[in-house]
Structure formats: C-alpha cells, structure tokens
Amino acid sequence: MKNLNRRNFIKKTSLSGVALSLGSMLPAYSTNNPVFEHDGKYMGGFAAPKLSKVRIAMIGVGARGSGHATQLASIEGTEIVAISDLYEDLANLSAERCKKMGKGSRHKDIAVYHGGEDKWTLMLDEVKPDAVFISTNWNNHAPMAIEAMKKGAHAFVEVPLAVTLEEMWDIVITSEQTQKHCMMMENVNYGREELLYLNMCRQGVIGDLLHGEAAYIHELRGQMNQQERGTGSWRTHHYADRNGNLYPTHGLGPVAQYMNLARGEDNFNSLVSFSTPALGRKSYAEKNYAKDHKWNKLDYKGGDFNTSIIKTTLGRTIMIQWDETSPRPYSRLNLVQGTKGALAGFPTRIALEGGVEGVTEDHHSWAQGEQLEKIYEKYEHPLYLRLGELSKTMGGHGGMDFMMLYRIVECLRNGDPLDQNVYEGCHWSAVAPLSEKSVAYGGTPQAFPDFTRGKWKSTEPLAILK
C-alpha cells in the first residue's frame, strides 16, 4: 500500500468491485456452449401426437401426489398403469383409491413399486407409460423428469421444476432432444382470479403493463413435525441450508403469463434479492423440541423473509416475496399494474382509471367483493366458464388442481400445446438459485439465462381458449 496513491487505489478497488458484479451475473451456461449443438427442436408451441388414451405412472404419492393420482383417475381418457413410492402403505393406498375411480374400473391393473430409491426407474422400464407425474422432494424433480423423457414419457413435475440452473438446462436439452413435454405443474395459473386477470390483461383493460407483485407468504412451521417422512422431513433442510426465495412460482407464474414473459412480448432479464435475518425457524425449534433434537442441531442460514425484484427485457418490474416462517395470513399478492389501472389479489380487487362502471368513480378506490359481479360477467375466462363448477366439485385448492390436470389430459388427447411450456417452468424456477446467489453477493444483480436462446420472440402468447 506504500506505493499506491489514493486515486489509483480507488480506481483499482472500484474496478475489482465491477468485475465481481459482472462475474456474479454470468449465467450457468453461455449460449455459445457446445451443449446447444444438438439435434433437438424448440419446444415453444410444441404439440405432441394425439393420445386416444393417456397411460399414466405416478412417482411419489404422499400428500400431493395421492391427490393428483385420484383426480387423474377420474378424468376420461386416462389409465393409471403404475404407482411408485418409497413407502408401501402410501403406494398401496393410492392404488386402491384409483381403482375405485373411472368408468368400468379402467384402472384395475395398477403395477405398484415401493421399498427402494430406484424402484421408479424399474417402473419406467417395465410399464413404459405415456406420461409420468412426479411429486417427490425437490432434489429428485430434475433427475426423474429427465429419465422419464429419455424413457419415452412426457414429464409433469411438481414445483419447482428443478433446484439448480444446470438441472434446468439439462431438462430443456432433454425435452428438445426427445420431443417430450416437461411441464412444471403450476396450479395457481388455473385459479379463478388468475384466469380472470389473464383475460383482462389480454383485452387491454388496464393498458400497457408496467409492474407486478407476486408472493408465497404461508406460515408452515408446523411441517417441522414431519420428521421422518413427509414434506417437513426434507424441506426443513432446504430452509436451513439455502438463503433466498426458495419457492417463487406460485405467485410468479400468473404474473409472468399476464406479461407474456418468454412468449413473444417480453422476457426475464435480471434479478436482485435480499433476505432478512434467519430467526423464526431456530426460535420455533428451540421452543418446540428438545435441545438434542435434530432440528436444534441445524444452522439455520435461510432468512425468514426474502424480497426479490425482477427486471424484464422491456424494463417492467416484478416484486416477489417469500416467507414460510413468520406469523401472518396467507397471501400471493397477485398484483399487476398497468397504465390504465390495477388488478390485485387477497382480497380480489380492481381499480381502473375513470372508475369501475357502476361501482367506483375513479381509481382512488377499489372495487371488490360483490361489486365485481359485472366484471366477472364480462371478463370471466372461457376456461373457467367451461370447467369452473366441475373443478370446484372435484376440489384441490379450490378446483385449480383439477382444472390443471384436466387441461393436461385434454391437451395430450387432442394433440394441442400445453398451457405451460418447459421454458416457462425453468424461468419461473430459476428465481430460487438466482436469488440465492444475489443474496450471497449482497444484492448484486443476477442475469437470467435465456432458456429459449432467443426463440421466445417468435413464441405465441398463451391463447385464451374459447
């Protein structure tokens, strides 16, 4: 330092800071990487050959997967051919429930696999299903989806689609090479409010879109009581070991489709992220478990509350928040702001420039509750008009689960493109690893990989099906 004057010192340290920032923004793979030189085809708008009957295999039938299995078994044109789970009781219970569903007991010959980490691979080899539904712990999502596609099946995966950017690229390349769908099952995109707002955005009701707000705020500390099996037994370790927004897609998926991200109009560009201190999980463990309990031996690194901000290619912004720890009512925010008004959730409410006809005089007050009756009459999404009542009867988060599964089967049988493509699943899931890196670098911006390699510009927006 003796021979370094103050001006040169500031210059060199500033350049080092810039280099660090730029280095932290490099995506996991360059678009010039040899991995892209393959014989696959782009999957945006991809429609697979029609299936008169969809032969379905399930991997993981715990709380989430068992519900999917039963609902899929109730949909015409499906046959549940195999179920795999680590636990024999769960696999057998789900198989018995499926056998009771559907006309003519079409699910009577269900092969059941259990008792080993690799039983699902044996199932794929022996049963050769058309479609595989994966509802396992997060770390298994990518390898199971990739293997399913390689074995000739379409893969449908619970959220998130994958944990790392490398896994997401592997999923994209495998899907393109095998020409098999790989869809992340973001059920919230099929909520009534979300479908209504999608239709209103498409019709230009709130003008040009500027900003969105998305969240998954859901206090789930009680899952820590699931210590040997169940969600808490593996998810608690993610909370302890990772610091970022680990579960972004429920709030982000609908907002991304409002804005046509990665579909012709706009795309994800960069992200900054910050987390609060990690206090809640440690405190909960100390209060509820013995000192020598395994939950009290963890070093909880993940902040209780994370806020991330996305900048899109067009310059729009999206705020995403995540908190599964703090005591607070459930919310996904679900807000989209346009040049002519705003649509918001929790509760459902709308403000328009000039007012909502017959309800409000201007945009300084919200129309909500029963005041929105005319809005629903005018802008109810055609998909909800067709399937809403049936979906509510069938259940699953108010019917959104059933509507999602019904649409998957419908698209496979009709040979139509899916409502969510593999690139959307990757972009939405990428928030988690990108936010972790941004938090680690003190909020440094992180560049989104373009999983479409520029092809998003020619990808059609999600159609409003009549």
Image (tube, rainbow, N blue to C red):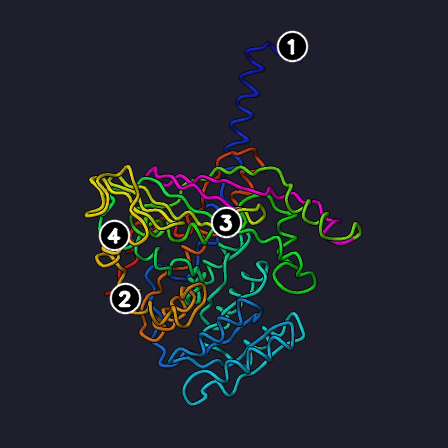
Q: CA distance from mark 4 to mark 2?
A: 17 Å
The residue carrying mark 2 is 385
Asked if the stretch drawn in magenta spans residue 150, the answer is no
Image: 56 above or below 319: below
Task: Tell me the residue that label 3 is attached to.
Answer: 329
SS for tag 4?
helix
Q: Name the element at disc 1.
A: loop
> Which of the two discs, 1 and 2, labels the residue nearer the N terminus?
1
Q: CA distance from mark 3 to mark 1?
A: 59 Å
Q: Is residue 336 above or below residue 41?
A: above
Quarter of the image that includes the N terminus: top right
> Local crowd at mark 4 within 10 Å, few (<14), some, or many (≥20)?
some
User: Of label 3 and label 2, which has the lower sequence position?
Assistant: 3
64 is higher (above) or lower (below) than 371: below
SS assignment at label 2: helix
Which numbered disc flags the more N-terminal residue, 3 or 1?
1
Q: Which residues are magenta?
A: 293-322
Q: Which marked residue is nearer to the observer: mark 3 or mark 1?
A: 3
Q: Residue at x 48, y 80 (%)?
A: 80
Contact? badges 1 and 2 (CB < 8 Å):
no
Instruction: Name the outermost residue toward the right.
Output: 292
* Amino acid bearing label 3: Pro
Across and down, in percent, residue 180 comes to 42, 67
